[in-house]
Image (cartoon, helix red, strand yellow):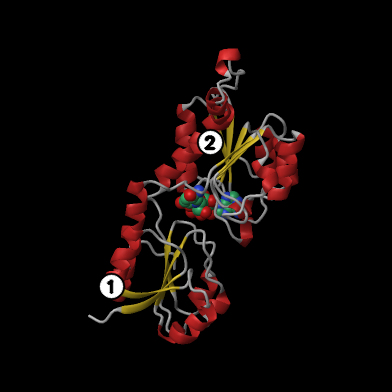
Amino acid sequence: MEKIPMLVLAPLPDFLMAPLHAAHVCHDYFHAEDKNALLSEVGTEIRGIVMAGGSVSPVPLLERLPKLEIISVFGVGYDGVPVDWCQGHGIRVTNTPDVLTEDVADTASALVLMTSRRLIAANRFLHAEAWTRGPFPLAHALRGKRAGIVGLGRIGKAIAQRLEAHGMSVAYHGRARQAVAWEYFESLIELAEMADFLIVACPGGAATKHLINAAVLTALGAKGTLINIARGSVVDETALIAALQSGIIRGAGLDVFENEPQVPEALMQCENAVLLPHLGSGTHETRHEMARLVVENLAAHFSGKPLLTPVC
Ligand code: NAP
């Protein structure tokens, strides 16, 4: 069978690239020194794109791929894809939902524990041989604390279950009330006023850009910690740094940033922030499952079968 020309927009793991190379001719756009030359050379032949959840496929790029049929995202978040434009041009989009839900919820839960119990600082304390000079300062318990989840989807619900197991109560904000027992807050500000931990688990993109702004952080207040495992774009990072520096909020646990992999120096200097390098779904088990979905979605599309996980 003739191999299908594909454009690869992000660095992807070998266990995904190996099956992609087997079935397709993969052109590495991410590492191409002259991207314009690459598009001039192969753009008119490309029939598929593979990209990561955090990468982007802007319309001007897609306009140079007249034979493009499908974009397969290695991730659940597809905020880097202009989905409306794709729908209008008959281009299908797939992602990798569900298989990563538990790992990302584990990461959020870990960030809640790391910030409340100051586990990173405690680890540094011990490595600095400070224990012999006295005990580590007391931290805060989770039981009885209130979690406010922004975006109660697959991951949000899995986070809620974990936090309930820690003895916390759960409420949520989203665009609509859901048929769940957890309390719904139509107002994000009121959720933040209530919450000890405000946990962001909604999609990124224009609709949620800077949803967590200075007003929300002020409402969260000095009792509160912000956890973000969603997308960096959802949080106004400048306002967050100011809130962490001035004690407007107690702390933050972040897996995602506005301009990854760049993290502002001022944020790295914040002792009350726990920062992770976007590793929410970063386990062998989950990334292999995600890779399988990418490959199977492409195979389904190019053999005329229904997609396993269609976005559109
Ligand atoms: P999902 O099932 O689609 O859940 C998203 C939730 O957000 C839905 O409940 C949705 O509810 C809500 N939502 C949408 N727009 C909103 C808004 N403007 N304000 C508040 N809530 C809103 O998606 P998921 O699988 O849980 O994934 C959620 C996100 O996590 C992804 O989009 C991705 O960006 C991020 N993620 C991060 C990592 C990581 O490594 N850190 C890994 C995977 C995913 P309504 O539609 O009813 O409003």
Asked if residue 87 can be seen in this view, the reply is yes
283 or 264, which lies in front?
Answer: 264
- Where's residue 72, x and y in %? 41, 67
Quarter the N terminus occupies: bottom left
120 or 61, which lies in front?
Answer: 120
- Where's residue 111, x and y in %? 53, 36
Residue lying at 54% horizontally and 33% vertically, measured from the top left: 112
Residue lying at 60% horizontally and 21% vertically, measured from the top left: 139
| Residue hosting label 2 | 111
Residue lying at 50% horizontally and 43% vertically, measured from the top left: 156
Q: Amino acid at mark 1?
A: Ala
Mark 2 vs mark 1: which is more N-terminal?
1
Is 23 located above or below residue 203 in the figure?
Answer: below
Is 119 located above or below residue 46 in the figure?
Answer: above
The reply, left or right, for residue 182 in relation to residue 284 is right
The tag on residue 175 is: none
Q: Amino acid at mark 2?
A: Leu
| Residue hosting label 1 | 23
